Amino acid sequence: MSEGNAEAGKKTDREERILDAVLVLLSQHGISGISMRAVSREAGVSLGLVNYYYDDKVTLIGAALRRIEREDMTMVDPDPDRSPEQNLRAALRRVAHAEFLTTEYLSLRLQLWALAQAHPDFGEINTAAQKRYRAAIATLIRAARPDLSRAESNKRAADIDVVQNGMWLTALLGLDRAAIRRSVTRCEEIAFG
């Protein structure tokens, strides 16, 4: 690895540690737990480094929100080796994977939703992310069900998003695996029905 690539790798690693720290603090303490100092402590980096990468708390939290969006979008990325129907089913089932049903992750989700009310930038980021997620689900539905209109695919994607978010919120209150399975089945019924 060249010296330039090694330095770029270090930079990426430090930024990822900072964003990881933001997400941990958000899930544990909400927005009130986020300060540049708290993030530097949690990430194990200097306060100066956090300030070097991020101008303020708003840009720091905004970067963390964008990272969550990128991760969310991987849930709906189609696999070229699968059929459209298999891709759609896989995307609908991913939200119920164990990694997304932990108290820490679900608490983070709740905080991310609440952030939309905390600052207009966060609301814009969340709204744009939700639109992209719904559009990706609608695209998967149209690929699996080409007989459906774009409007119908969009409507079904919106309904699925509501069910999925409700499933996550309900799972935070207490994990009911049977209800989770029924929710996934309901999303499949909405998509394919």
Image (cartoon, rainbow, N blue to C red):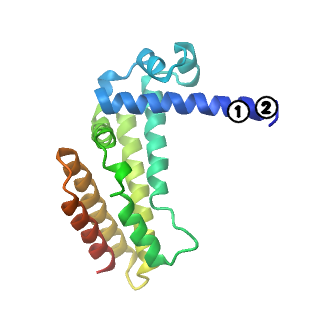
- Mark 2 nearby-residue class (10 Å; few <14, some 14–19, many ≥20): few
Q: Image quarter for residue 86?
A: bottom left
Location of mark 1 (residue): 8
Amino acid type at mark 2: Gly
- Helix, strand or loop for disc 1: helix
- Give the camera-side residue of 1 and 160: 1
As drawn, 128 above or below 60: below
Q: Which residue is drawn at the image coordinates 59% and 19% (left, top)?
A: 52
Amino acid type at mark 1: Ala
Q: Where is residue 63 in the image (x, y as percent from the top left)?
A: 49, 35
In the displayed orientation, state which residue is furthest to the right. Answer: 2
Q: Which residue is drawn at the image coordinates 51% and 19% (left, top)?
A: 44
From this viewpoint, is residue 30 visible? no
As drawn, 73 above or below 172: below
Location of mark 2 (residue): 4
Task: Say left or right for 177 vs 136.
Answer: left
In the displayed orientation, state which residue is furthest to the bottom. Answer: 147
